[in-house]
Amino acid sequence: MPKKQLTAARGMEAACILFQLNSKTEAILAMARGAQMPNDYLAGPGADMFCAEWRAFVHAVVTAGLMQHAPNVVFMGYLRQTGNLLADAGSTAGKPAEDAEAALTAFVDGPFAQYMPLLAQEQQARCPELFCQRLAVQAAKLRGQATPPDDHAKARLAAIMAMVISAVWDKLDQYEFLAE
């Protein structure tokens, strides 16, 4: 079956939609509850940390998928949308411009930069452990202590992460992205 062709602009739009579909706050928190993550991550500042970390993971998944399936113009165009995607997700909405810029830089240089090498080098199995480690470190800084996810929660999280990677990359594989 031939792949559906997308212009570069439509390809960037499709990538943004994939991010948005997988980064809604309510859905992330429902997933965290379903994975039986510790209560520390289900409300308040812990939930904000969990959602931000999940969005970094999803952004890296979409970016790595574009690296495999799309020309550089689509890949770079999607990366240029990072600030808008975070604002739409509520991560930087309502913040003064300099705070939003600092949050964007922290996102790109922090969690996003940590997931990209794993995904680009086909080491996605290491993402759940990185995710849990990063959450534990952030929670410890916030509260002085953290309840780490147990092995059951980590296994559920790993399964969910694997499904997201597969779904996003399979969807991107259905298209032929044109460079224009």
Image (cartoon, rainbow, N blue to C red):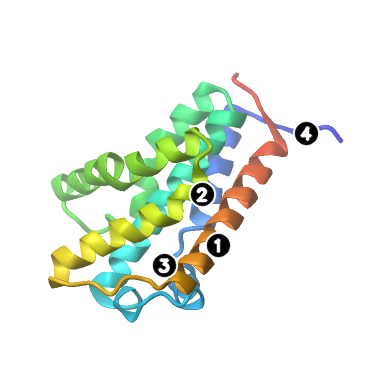
Image-based side of 153 in relation to 56, left or right: right
Tell me which amino acid carries mark 2.
Ala
Sequence-earlier tag: 3 or 4: 4
Q: In front: mark 2 or mark 3?
A: 2
Q: In front: mark 4 or mark 2?
A: 2
Tell me which amino acid carries mark 3.
Thr
Q: Residue at x 37, y 52 (%)?
A: 130
Sequence-earlier tag: 4 or 2: 4
Residue highlighted by disc 4: 3
In the picture, the quarter occupied by the N terminus is top right
* 3D distance between C-alphas at marks 4 and 1: 27 Å
Residue highlighted by disc 2: 125
The foreground one among 6 and 128 is 128
User: What element does badge 1 sit on?
Assistant: helix
Whole-percent x, y for residue 3 in the image = 78, 33
Residue highlighted by disc 3: 25
Tell me which amino acid carries mark 4.
Lys
